[in-house]
Image (cartoon, rainbow, N blue to C red):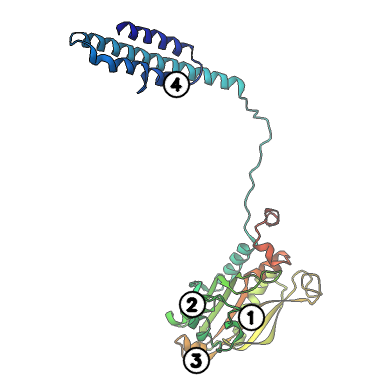
Amino acid sequence: MKQQLEQIRTTAIAEIAAADTSLEEIRIKYLGKKGALTAILRGMGSLTPEERPVIGAVANEVRNDIESALEKRGAELKKLSLARSLVEEKLDVTYDAIAPNAGHIHPITRALERMTEIFIDMGFSIVEGPEVETVGNNFDALNAPADHPSRDFQDTFYITESTLLRTQTSPVQIRAMRGMTPPIRIISPGRVYRSDVADASHSPMFHQLEGLVIDKGITMGDLKGILSKFAKTMFGPETKTRFRPHNFPFTEPSAEVDVSCFVCGGKGCRLCKNEGWMEILGAGMVHPEVLRAGGIDPDVYTGFAFGMGVERVAMVMSGIDDLRLMFENDARFLKQF
């Protein structure tokens, strides 16, 4: 058995010295659970009590010598590998670097940030609300009659009979009126949902920014002044606004608001479809029933509200004629902005 141990030591050390790759296989071959040295040690039970200490001491020496040889050769192989890498792997520091692709602010985000900034400068505060709303806040409190087309299943994403994905950010105004005391001066930006088929001008999910002002003595003239200031700041100092009579359940009187085309100055071009004007929002004086639904006395307070599609403004700002481009995330399109 002693001769076998010596033979294992000689053979193992020779293999380790000759190795030029991983040493793990050699370690397992001699020192593993099924290795040559382990097999010898399992046969020590047949030795006499006098022989066991002698063979045990030799076995420990053999193990220590093999482990030392593995450690020494491992260090040598690491040095050889590093030297080989320094020769074979070269870095040309004069080679032109590949510039990383930088991200860009999305046209919708850019428009929303600019719109929000303008109204904050005019003293408005931002108020947000849940995207899953009650039918009461989304329709009933906003004076929408029971047979209003917007309540149809074809137009609205209902979750239950009493809850839905909000179709507008106007419910935020109801929540604000119930939780705040006039004077109120807020804007409510956010995502809204309608059951529309995606095309060049429609999307089932889009963004709105709505505004609400309530105080004593608020008039339509105040609304026109705020929106005129917004349009001039957003689209240029020469921008004009035009109010056209309209009908919304939650405002009375109501109006659709156009701005003069900032590209052609009102003369007519492709962007404004040769009309000289572009519709951007709806507005009006808050209906007395909506004030009552919000817990505000219409005999004491008046107010106005307005709402605009952020995508519509972003398309006008960027000269985009297809809404689907906003959501396809094509890098070639986004790089233009």
Residue type at mark 1 is Gly
Crowding at mark 2 (Cα within 10 Å: few <14, some 14-19, many 20+):
few
Answer yes or no: do the residues labelled 3 and 1 have beta carbons within 8 Å?
no
**Disc 2 marks which residue?**
160
Answer left or right for 26 relative to 108: left
The residue at 66%/39% (across/down) is: 98
Residue type at mark 3 is Pro
The span from disc 4 to disc 2 (Cα, nearest Å) is 66 Å
Which label's residue is closer to the chain start, 1 or 4? 4
Relative to 203, does residue 290 appear above or below in the rendering? Answer: below
SS assignment at label 3: loop
Which label's residue is closer to the chain start, 3 or 2? 2
Q: Position of residue 250 (x, y in %)?
A: 56, 86
Residue type at mark 2 is Thr
The span from disc 1 to disc 4 (Cα, nearest Å) is 78 Å
**Disc 3 marks which residue?**
298
Which label's residue is closer to the chain start, 4 or 2? 4
The span from disc 2 to disc 1 (Cα, nearest Å) is 29 Å
User: Can residue 123 be seen from the camera position used here?
Assistant: no
The span from disc 3 to disc 1 (Cα, nearest Å) is 21 Å
SS assignment at label 1: strand
The residue mark sitting in front, 4 or 3, is: 4
Answer yes or no: do the residues labelled 4 and 2 have beta carbons within 8 Å?
no
The residue mark sitting in front, 2 or 1, is: 2
The span from disc 3 to disc 2 (Cα, nearest Å) is 32 Å
Q: Quadrant of the C terminus?
A: bottom right
Q: Position of residue 230 (x, y in %)?
A: 63, 74
Which label's residue is closer to the chain start, 4 or 3? 4
**Disc 4 marks which residue?**
25
**Disc 1 marks which residue?**
282
